[in-house]
Amino acid sequence: MLGRKQSLKGEQVLADYGPEESLNESADIEWVNKLWVRRILRFCALLSLMSVSLNTPKTFEKHPNLQNITFGVDCCVTLLFTAEMIAKMHIRGILKGDVAYLKDHWCQFDASMVFFLWVSVLLQMFELTGIVPRYSYLSILRAPRPLIMIRFLRVFLKFSMPKSRINQIFKRSSQQIYNVTLFFLFFMSLYSLLGVQFFGELTHHCVRNTTKPNEVTINSLAIPDTFCSPEPGSGYQCPAGMKCMKLNLSKYIMGFNGFEEFTTSLFTVYQASSQEGWVFIMYRAIDSLPTWRSALYFSTMIFFLAWLVKNVFIAVITETFNEIRVQFQQMWGVRNPITKGSTTQFFTGDDNGWKLVTIDENKHSGSAPEIFHRMLRSAYFRLLVMGVVLANGIITATMNFKHDGNPREFFYEKYYYIEIAFTVFLDLEALIKIWCLGWKGYFKHSVHKFELLLAIGTSIHIIPQLYMSAFTYFQVLRIVRLIKASPLLEGFVYKIFGPGKKLGSLIIFTMCLLIISSSISMQMFCFLCEFTKFETFPEAFMSMFQILTQEAWVEVMDETMVRTSQTLTPLVAIYFILYHLFVTLIVLSLFVAVILDNLELDEDIKKLKQLRYRQQSAEIKETLPFRLRIFEKFPDSPQMTKLHKVPGDFNLPKVRESFMRQFVCEAEGEEEGGPGAAISLRPGGERRALEYSTGEKIAFPYRKRSLVKTLVVAPPSQRPSSALRRHVVASIINDSNNHRLVLGDSAMLAAAGKAGLKPQGTISSAKQLRVDQKK
C-alpha cells in the first residue's frame, strides 16, 4: 500500500495539451494558454486539414479560385501556429529545464507540423510562380500535413490518471499485441519460404510456335493468357499450334506477385492471406507445377493465416480492450448503471398473475379522461398499433414500377390514399399519447421522440408535391417500430447500441482515420497523370474505404504500383499493406470488442449467476460429495419418517419439506411474532406466516396440511421444547427464503391463481413486495 500511495502522489496526469496547460502562470506571455486561443488553434487545425484536402492539381483545374484561397488559409494558419510555438518556447525554454519545449512529445509533434506547414506554403508559392510544375512528385512533401487533425482530436482524449497507471496499461496491452504480431510474422515468413521452395518462378506461358523470345506481343499469347508447365505430365500442356515458353518481361507487364525471391513471395503470401484474388494465384501454380503442391500449400495457408491468425488478432484486441476497461474501472470505481428517471419498482399481482410495476406508472400529468389512460396501458392497443405498422410495411413492399410508358403517378395512385389512412391513424396515436402523458411525460421516453419525428415527417410526406421526395424515408423507417413488438429483440438491440457512446466514438474514430488516410494518400499519388483514384479527395476517400472493406483492394494497390517508378514501387506496396493490416486487424477488431463489451453482463451479476449455476449443478449430481458418502455406511435408523406428498402440488423445496411441516403446523402462542416469528393462527383454522419487508409486517396465508406420523414416537425426555423448535425452524425458513431471494430464484414467485405460503416461501398475490433497483 505504501508503494501504491507513492505512485499516486505528485504524478503528472494526461490532459488536452499536455503539461503546458498547467504552466500558464507566466506573466510575460499569457495569451497562448487562454481557452479561447486554444479553441482558435483547434479550429485552425480543421482549416489546415480542409486546405490540404483541396490542394490537388485536378481540383484546381475544376475550381481555379481555390488555389489562391488555400494559399491564403495556409499562410494564416502557419503564422498562428508559428507564433504559438515561439510563445511556448519562451515560456518553457527550448532545451534547458525539466519542462523544455523539445522534451515534451506533444510539443515535438506540434513543431513538426509547423515545419511541414512552412514547406507546404513555400511549395505552393513555387507552384503559383511556375517554378515547380503542377503535376510534380514534390507534392509528397504535403503528405504529413493531414496529421494535424490529431491536434483537434486529442482534446477528446482528456482524462485524469496517474502516469504510472497509464504506462502499466500500455505496457501490458502492447506486449500482447507484440506477441500476436510475432505470431503473424512467423507464419508469413514460413509460407514465404515454402512458396519459394515449392514454386519458384512462374513465368511460362503458352505462345504461338513462331514466337521468338525477344519479340513477344499480346497477339503472340493464347486467348485467354494461360500459364503452362514445360515438363510433360504435370501442369497444363499447351494445345496444338502453341508451345510453352519462358517470358522474360518486366514486372509492370507480368505482374508484381510471384514466388521468385523472399520479398516477392512475402508480398504474394499477404495478398493471398487477405482472401482477395488468392484463387488466381493458386490456379497459376496449378497450371505451372504438379497439382498436389498448390493444393497442399494454399489450403494450409488459408487455414492458418486467413482463419487462425486473424481470429487470434481479434481475440487479443478484444481481451486488450476488456483489460483497459478493467484498469479504468479499478481506478475510477464501479461504473454506474444506466438508470431512468424512476427506477423504483415493486411486484404486484392479482388472480391473473404477477408483474413488475413502476411506482410512477399510474401517475400521469395529461388532461385526458381515465378511459384513455386505460386504453393506452392496455396490451390490445399496443398490438393494434404494431399490426398497423406491420400492415403498412407489407403494403409498401408491394409497390413496384414498370417501364411501360405510363406516367410515374399511375403506379402509386392507389398507394397514396392508403398511405394517407396509415398516416392519419399514427398521427392520432401520437396525439393521444401527448394528451394522456402531457408534453413532459411524453418526451421523457426516447421512443416517443422517434415516433413524433416519424409522425411529422410522414405528415409532410403525404403532401402531393412531396410524396415522391426524400420524405419517403420517414415512411420506410416506420418498420423500425416493430422492434418494440419483441421484448427480447428490443433488449438485444439496446445492449448492442446501448447509449451509443462507445460505438459512436468508434465510428467517429474510423471516419477520422479514413479522412486522414485519404488526404495522405491523395497528396502521395495526386501527381500521377490520368489516375482517377487519387486525383481529388472524394475519389481518394472511396479508394481508401474500398481497402477498408477488403473489396478488390489488390486492384487499387496494383494500379498505383504500375503508375509509379521502379524505386517507389516497394514503398507503395509497403504503404498499402500496412494500411490494410491496420484497418482489417485492429479497427474492425475494435468493433467486435465494443459489441462484445456491450453484450457482457456486469461483473457482479456474472459472479452471482456463476454461483447460482454452480449450486444447481451440485444439486443434480447423482453422486454425493465425499464428505457425505460416509453416511451411506450407517444403518437405517428406526426413527426415520415417511412422507406421502401429492405429486405436482408443489415443487421440490430447498429446505426438506417433511422437516419443515412438522413444526410449521404447530403454532399457538406467537401470533404477534418476535424476532423469530414464523406463523400465526386465524380463527378459521387457517395459518398465516409473518414476513418483514422494509419495516412492515406482512402476513401470507396457507392451508394446513395433515401431520405426518413417525414410525416410532420418541420419549418425552428426548423431545425439545415447542418454543425452541418453532424458533429454530422459523430461522431456517427465513434464512433459506432470503438466500434464494438474493440469488434471484424463480421459485420465489407464486404461480398465477395460487395463494398462500408454499414450501418454498412464495409470496401471496394479495400483497406487494417492493424491489428498489437503486440499491
Image: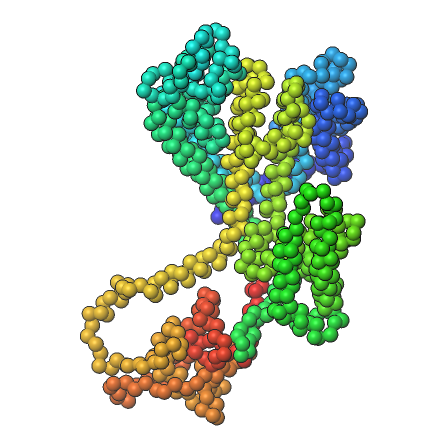
Q: Is residue 488 left or right of residue 104?
A: left
Residue drawn at x 37%, y 27% is: 294
Of residue 401 and residue 661, the one placed in the foreground of this image is 401
Q: Is residue 307 visible?
A: yes
Of residue 648 and residue 389, the one placed in the foreground of this image is 389
User: Looking at the image, is 451 positioned above or below residue 162?
Assistant: below
Residue drawn at x 37%, y 82% is: 661
The C terminus: image quadrant: bottom right
User: Looking at the image, is 604 positioned above or below residue 410?
Assistant: below
Image position, residue 36 (x, y; %): 76, 38
Q: Is residue 480 left or right of residue 442?
A: left
Image position, residue 524 (x, y; %): 63, 22
Of residue 206 and residue 82, the one placed in the foreground of this image is 206
Residue drawn at x 64%, y 66% is: 384
Q: Residue furthest bottom?
A: 683
Q: Is residue 189 visible?
A: no
Colouring of the image: rainbow
Residue 121 figure quarter: top right
Image position, residue 747 (x, y; %): 44, 71
Image position, residue 499 (x, y; %): 61, 52
Figure label count: 0
Residue drawn at x 63%, y 59% is: 391
Residue 90 figure quarter: top right
